[in-house]
Image (cartoon, rainbow, N blue to C red):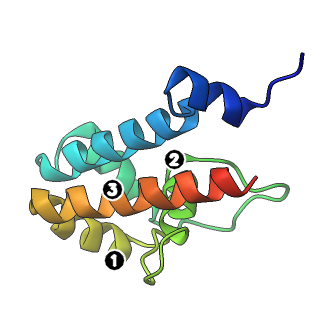
């Protein structure tokens, strides 16, 4: 007997692991953005958007900012994570925990909706 992934999730009353990972990723980002800007994680995020020289050739790397930007692109408004300005905007949202929680809930809901379409 063959059972689909979605049927198994429903039968076990669970969500896909990818949704748990997405939630954890955004919870961690909010925690990092609320911390001091001098901690290594914040410096790494800020340093990612500093352009030095030419970009390398080949397939674009799948980095954390790329994945976060893809998550943001799922929701309706024009939020993105492609520059240090976008990072600062997300940092200002993260300072307001209620707003950050709403944002992460919208991202999670959009991800769940896109998974249910497949």
Earlier sequence position, callout 2 versus callout 1: 2
When asked about the image quadrant of residue 56, the answer is: bottom right
Q: Do the residues labelled 2 and 1 touch (CB within 8 Å)?
A: no
Are the residues at dot 1 and dot 3 in contact (C-beta closer than 8 Å)? Answer: no
Residue that badge 1 annotates:
85
For disc 2, the marked residue is 64
Question: Element under label 3?
Answer: helix
- Could you tell me how far apart the alpha carbons at marks 2 and 1 are, in whole angstroms? 17 Å
Secondary structure at badge 2 equals helix
Q: Where is residue 80 in the image (x, y as percent from the top left)?
A: 46, 73
Kindly report the distance in space between the C-alpha atoms of the residues bearing marks 3 and 2.
Answer: 16 Å
**Residue at image point 9% right, 63% down:** 96
Give the residue at x 55% y 29%: 17
Residue placed farthest to the bottom in the image? 78
Which residue is more in the foreground, 56 or 14? Answer: 14
Whether pointer 3 and pointer 2 mark residues with C-beta atoms closer than 8 Å, the reply is: no
Residue 10, given in percent of the width and then of the height, sits at: 58, 31
Picture coordinates of residue 35 (x, y %)? 13, 46
- Count residues near mark 2 (Cα–Cα under 10 Å), then give few for <14, some for 14-19, many for 20+: few
Q: Mark 3 points at which residue?
A: 104
């Amino acid at each position: 007997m063959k059972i689909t992934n979605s049927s198994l999730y429903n039968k076990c009353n669970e969500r896909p692991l990818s949704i748990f990972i997405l939630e954890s990723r955004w919870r961690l980002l909010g925690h990092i953005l609320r911390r001091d800007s001098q901690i290594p994680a914040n410096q790494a995020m800020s340093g990612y958007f500093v352009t030095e020289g030419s970009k390398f050739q080949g397939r674009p790397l799948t980095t954390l900012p790329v994945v976060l930007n893809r998550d943001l692109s799922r929701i309706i408004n024009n939020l993105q994570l492609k520059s240090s300005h976008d990072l600062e905007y997300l940092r200002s949202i993260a300072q307001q925990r209620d707003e950050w929680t709403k944002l992460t809930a919208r991202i999670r809901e959009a991800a769940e909706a896109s998974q249910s379409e497949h």
